Image (cartoon, rainbow, N blue to C red):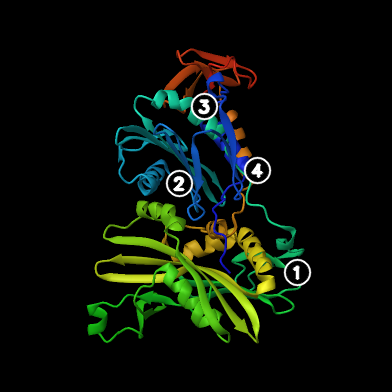
Amino acid sequence: MKRTTQWVLIGGVFFCVGVIAYFAIRLVSDQLRDWTTYKDPFGISMDVPRNWKVSFDRLSGRTEIQGAEGEQLVIWPVFIPGSLTPAAAGTALGRLAAKFWPEARWQAPQSVASTLVRMRGRLGDRVATAIFTWIASPKGSASYVYALAAPEVRYRQAEETFARLLQSFRIAGAAVSDKQQPSLQFETWQDPREQAFSLEVPSRWRVSGGLFRFASVDLRPVIEIVSPDGKVRITGGDAEIPGFAIPNPTLEWTGFREGSWYSPGYGVNVLVRRYIPGAAFAREYAVTKVARGCADVKVVDTRDRADAVEALNAVYSQYAVPGFSMQLTAGEVSFTCRREEEPMHGYYFAATQITQGYGVGLWRVEYLYGYLATSDKAAEAQSVLEHMLNTFQLNPQWVRMQQGLAANTSQIVSRTSQEISRIISQSYWSRSEVMDELSRRRSNATLGVEDVIDPLTGREFKVESGSNYYWVDHRGMIVGTDTDTRPNIDFRELIRLP
């Protein structure tokens, strides 16, 4: 079954509040009356000028809007497990911006606020601005990249158009028919081996797995669930997959050729094998192991998912040890087969991580999730997998214990399945996490003078505190109000910095 891979990462609530928080412009100008509402089957909607074009890329999750006179706006949601620093965010912004505008020349990223980084640049004869904003939560950093470009002579006039586009942008998620909604009850299942993690699984389904510990730093979390009728099997991880060492002349000279076992120390045993990128590993695993016992196995679709790990790789680079590099590659496979003459649909996602330096290379399978189900149960399998990944949690006490055992083997801790769930399921981020953060920002104002910023120009101002909202017009006049009602149509809202 070819799975819809749209990236509807964040619900309409986050985007609506996030745009107001960072762009905060509420203009409905008489000059912009010739607009229409754009909607597509993937749940994207926004107000656009009638002669502008909108496109949504399901694989990357990017929305791109093209104007009639060279204007361009890109909106890209990104989720990064773990916390972000402005320096890491700046690196991520540079790499992500290069993905959609590789020919642009950018200045160095600037930290505008504690959770906002901006770059200015040029794109041929156009002026460009790229912004990276994020909100931290216990599950990771919910982030957005905004990129605006317009001919230099039109950039100022285009700002108000960009403002209205962003204010009206909504992500509601693709509609799902009632037939795709399994009427299942879920219950919490906890790792029985070390109580390392928990997640929700359907009641009365057979569940097995747990955390398999082969050494202090060789941990393999595994779960397998099977429906009561045996028509759905969902797995995460595989205890039989070890770590791997990349063949090199030194290993071969000492007798460790490809296919042999080698120990780098600390009780860890790895298999000598050439590196396999995520997409290729997903295909190999699905065909050779998941579909074992099936007939007529046919791969319907194999896709590289570099977009899924681009942001995470940018963060990895911030923690790189001199002389060493760490990188993830990801991919997915959809396939069909027959089991006892019954047609089956399958899907698997895999991400493999490679670490290299000084002629030595190690790699492992970081993420591995998927299912095999009868054709009439494929939608149910998809939904259950999404729910499992969304509810996956690490036990904080176990994390503290493991950090002690691992002794700083990694500075990126507590990765969860939220990133993979986002890729697979188009689920929404928690409304409460976003609202709590925005409430915190509003409560940061103190008596005296406070800082505000114009999100479109990047200019900062010091204003007398005491008002709930601050506004600026095109002449630079600043007005404070107690309500969110704009003084008049010429004013746009300023952001209060934490």
Label 2 – label 1 distance at C-alpha: 37 Å
Q: Earlier in the sequence, mark 1 or mark 4?
A: 1
Query: Which labelled disc corresponds to residue 84?
Result: 2
Instruction: Give the Cα separation between the discs numbered 1 and 4.
Output: 27 Å
What's the amino acid at mark 1? Answer: Ser
Give percent across and percent down for residue 200.
Answer: 68, 64
Numbered-mark total: 4
Q: Which residue is mark 3?
A: 495
Amino acid beneath label 2: Leu
Report the Cα–Cα distance between label 4 and label 2: 20 Å
- Percent coordinates x, y for residue 354 in the rendering: 37, 67
- Closer to the eye: label 2 or 1: 1
> Secondary structure under badge 4?
helix
In space, the residues marked 3 and 2 are separated at their CA atoms by 21 Å
Labels 2 and 1: the sequence-earlier one: 2
- Residue at the spot x=64%, y=73% of the render? 192
Q: Nearer the viewer, residue 89 or 14?
A: 14
Of callouts 1 and 3, which one flags the residue occurring earlier in the amino acid sequence? 1
Looking at the picture, which amino acid does disc 4 mark?
Ser
Of the image marks 4 and 2, the number of the one nearer the N terminus? 2
Question: What is the crowding at mark 4: few (fewer than 14 residues within 10 Å), some, or many (at least 20)?
Answer: few
Task: Answer whether residue 193 is visible to the viewer in this image.
Answer: no
The residue pinned by badge 4 equals 432
**Location of residue 30 by image quarter:** top right
- Give the class, few, some or many, for how many residues have Cα within 10 Å of label 2's Cα (few <14, many ≥20): many
The image quarter containing residue 422 is: bottom right
Q: x%, y% of residue 458?
A: 42, 27
